Amino acid sequence: MKKLIVITSPRFFQGEDTVLSHLFDEGMQRLHLRKPDSEANELRKLLDRIPAIYYPKIVLHDCFGLAVEYGLGGVHLNRRNNQIPDGFTGTISRSCHSIGELEQFGELDYLFLSPIFQSISKEGYGNGFEPETLRQASDTGTINDKVIALGGIDQTTLPLLRPFRFGGAAVLGALWGNHPSVDKEDSIITQYKKLQAWN
């Protein structure tokens, strides 16, 4: 079964803790908590409202000290934060934007490769790889079950990943849209189930 990783909306929204908890209840295995403009206390408030049983399934993109404090499942290295926190024993992942970076950081637990398709959440952020490039990287084993496809992932593009050896896909825009809210929880859960069904 391929992994389906959910990346949070970059902005906090009312009732987000409820929606995330219900996504976990529906079987979400991995949540990347990515709020690039947030402070540690804002992330702490959200984490405090999510049941602790789900903490091992949460990966932080910022404020890595909270990963140790809360016993979270992982940290995701990026240009803003590229140092593993002292004492952290969870998974380490990273964003990559070239095949060369996949080779450079292949020792990490898993890697995001983006943008695979035209981004849904970032306007003008197009696909960065020709299918032949992805095919060659799959044939050589550079794209393998540790590499997660990101960028433009939705119900129509998920099947296009099958010829390659990605270990899964990460979704953001296809799940949250432009204005997520607790009022849209039912449609978010329904969309998650549809995306999850690609396996």
Image: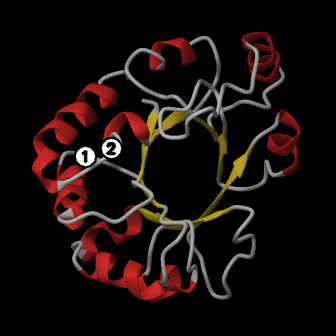
Which residue corresponds to the image point at 67% horizontal and 25% vertical from the top-left? 127
Q: Give the x, y percent position of residue 111.
A: 67, 47
Mark 2 vs mark 1: give the one in front.
2
Quarter in which the C terminus is drawn: top left
Q: Give the x, y percent position of residue 35.
A: 48, 66
In screen coordinates, is 134 left or right of 76?
A: right
Quarter in which the N terminus is drawn: top left
Q: Observer-nearest residue: 118 or 195?
A: 118
Count every numbered label the image shows and give the total: 2
Q: Give the x, y percent position of residue 91.
A: 58, 64
The colour style of the image is secondary structure
- Can you tell which mark lies on residue 165? none
The amino acid type, in three-letter code, at marker 1 is: Gly
Q: Is residue 63 above or below residue 56?
A: below
Which residue corresponds to the image point at 27% horizontal and 76% vertical from the top-left? 52
Which residue corresponds to the image point at 62% horizontal and 35% vertical from the top-left? 145
The amino acid type, in three-letter code, at marker 2 is: Trp
Which residue corresponds to the image point at 26% horizontal and 26% vertical from the top-left? 194
- Can you tell which mark lies on residue 176? 2
Q: Observer-nearest residue: 71 or 43?
A: 43
Could you give the CA–CA distance between mark 2 and mark 1, rounded to whole angstroms? 17 Å
- Can you tell which mark lies on residue 27? 1
Q: Observer-nearest residue: 25 or 177?
A: 177
